[in-house]
Image (cartoon, rainbow, N blue to C red):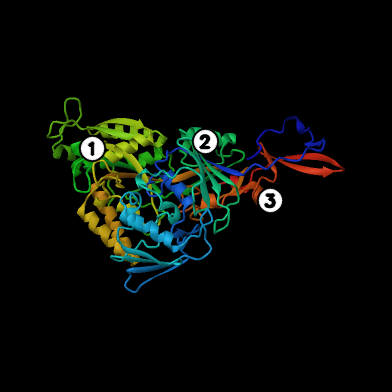
Amino acid sequence: MGITRRLGSIVGATGLVALPLAAPAQAQQPVTLRVAIVQQVDSLNPFLASYQTSTEIGRLMYDYLTAYDVKDQRPVEGVAKSWEKSADDLTWTFTVPDGKKWSDGQPVTAKDVAFTYNLMMTDKDAATANGSFVANFETVAAPDDRTVVIKTRSPQASMLALDVPIVPEHVWSGVGKIADYKNDTGPVVSGGPFTLSEYRANEFIKLKANKGYWRGAPKYDELHFIYYKTVDAAVQALDKGELDLVNRMGPAQFDSLKDKQGITRNKAQGRRFNELVLNSGAATKTGEPIGDGHPALKDVKVRQAIAKAIDLDAIIARVNGGYAERGTGPIPPVFPDFHYTPSTVRPFDPAAANTELDQAGYPKGSDGVRVGADGKPLKFRLIGHSSRAYDEQAGEYVKGSLADIGIAVDVQIVADTLLDEYSVAGKFDLIFSGWGTNPDPDFILSLNTCDARPASPTASGTTDTFFCDQAYDDLYKKQGAELDPGKRSELVKQMQQRFYDQVPAIILGHDNVLEAYRDDTFASFPIQPDPGGVIMAQNGMWGYYGAVPVAAAAGGSSGPSGLLIGGIVVVVLLVGGGVWLLAKRRGATAGDRE
């Protein structure tokens, strides 16, 4: 960071050169962590944000009521330090300690918590991203600045996993229409370890360390998220030293960085899943059809045949390069209490898929493409993200696989924002999607309930698939009210079995997270969970908050107290009234080995 030019002629053959005394140094440049992002931001308003990049920024700016521990993801202190529930499991009391402050110096109080939740309970726009967390709340009150009392209509298992950013009442009470508020003009008043200072769409997001953060200030000054159109471009920038941290790499990109000087790689068990969503009937909450999905996909037999025609192991081997785990439900193996593997896994069997489509009344036409009873050929559009090489590669594989069973596929790779528009409006047949899951499964399960669908054809919902199934919804309500861990786990697994059988989407796999960072600028990053966890896209802010610059790791201040020039440490020595530069190239650390 800071100065990055080469030493040039000031270092001689011996690496020791006398120089005249220099003029007093200018003000130090801020120590900055530069992070690549390839996904566009949908909103920096925490009530509206749903993209992974957007919610990750939100975690840095706003604390939740409770947090997930960096080591094992158990509930730990967030805005609230302690909590207790009533004997009937309907009333939860949280204590907000004195001393926590917003970035503008105003105190964080229980009234901020009550304001945030009540806003979501009374304003449908404020409930856009995370409304499922408060849907069961009856009342939220703050009888004093230190106490929050939440009463629920029925027992709620997710009370210590409310992934809702707590916002300052003294700022947000003055916001007019939530749906129109961008929250992207710095400085933004925040309660997390960073505050937003500047944002330019599709260019960068700049944050500054919150020096008054209650856990202590980060060990560096600024955090910049820099937008790249492709992961390839981001990886090249990392290799050149123009970035410090990159994730979302593909197998070839990750492998290309092996044994690179100054770069440490991290392969972790991920919490995200890739899926192929099948438009089984996009509609509003009231059942009003929307979009233009192919009618044949409403037939569960067609969806089941498609699932049988796709070889998931081959996709993991050929597209993921082996860096993924097979999935059947949305909850990944990293959360073993809720991860589910059916006793009978659906086989890869194109012959059976062909037979089932024949029997279901979809004969092949003269061109080899099947036709429905309505005379409409089974020709599907498959929409993918331009920001992900995965979508293009997997799309071609799906296209070839479905051609083998008489279904034609047109793969269309589009910008993330356009894909989002198609998805929300139900204007697709097949579409690539994916979500990150949390230690508590409630939110990810809620995305496939009837209530997650949009309120109107022009509204935005939080649905993942437009799936609406009474059996699934009944199980969802039961698991949400079940406080016995073992019984709840069984209900969650039954939900995933129902999802698997009805095939509103095909879980293609749970990616390993492939990350890399410059170890000549940042010495270490916390991973979650530890061991085996991720740096970016955590359930929390630890990876960024706990990053340690090389200078700080060496015992210096959080600022750039030394010069790190092109991978060369330069030590300034005062010898006999002269100034000498002693240059020594950094060697690889133990962290370079996997």
Quadrant containing the N terminus is top right
Q: Residues within 10 Å of mark 1 (few under 14, many from 20)?
A: some
Judge by depth and name the residue closer to the eye, 352 or 152.
152
Q: Nearer the viewer, residue 85 or 47?
A: 47
Q: Residue at x 35, y 31 (%)?
A: 413
Foreground of the two, 553 or 113: 113
Question: Horizontal and vertical percent for residue 55?
Answer: 42, 47
> In what element is the residue under mark 1?
loop
Q: Position of residue 345 (x, y in %)?
A: 29, 49
Q: In the rendered structure, which disc, 3 or 1, sits on the residue that comes first in sequence? A: 1
- Spatial CA distance of label 3 from label 1 is 58 Å
222 over 486 or under it: above or below = above
Observer able to see residue 289: yes
Looking at marks 2 and 1 on the same chain, the residue that comes earlier in the sequence is marked by 2
Counting the numbered discs, the total is 3
- What amino acid type is highlighted by mark number 2? Val
Q: Which residue is denoted by mark 3 in the rendering? A: 556
For mark 2, does the 10 Å Cα neighbourhood hold few (<14), some (14 to 19), or many (20 or more) residues?
A: many
- At mark 2, the secondary structure is helix
**Element carrying mark 3:** loop
Q: Position of residue 587 (x, y in %)?
A: 67, 42
Q: Please give left or right for residue 407 compared with residue 142 in the image.
A: left
Which residue is drawn at the image coordinates 22% and 35% (left, top)?
Answer: 292
Q: Earlier in the sequence, mark 2 or mark 3?
A: 2
Check if mark 3's residue and mark 1's residue have beta carbons within 8 Å: no
- Gap in Å between the C-alphas at discs 2 and 1? 37 Å
- Circle 2/circle 1 CB separation < 8 Å: no
Q: Which residue is mark 1?
A: 291
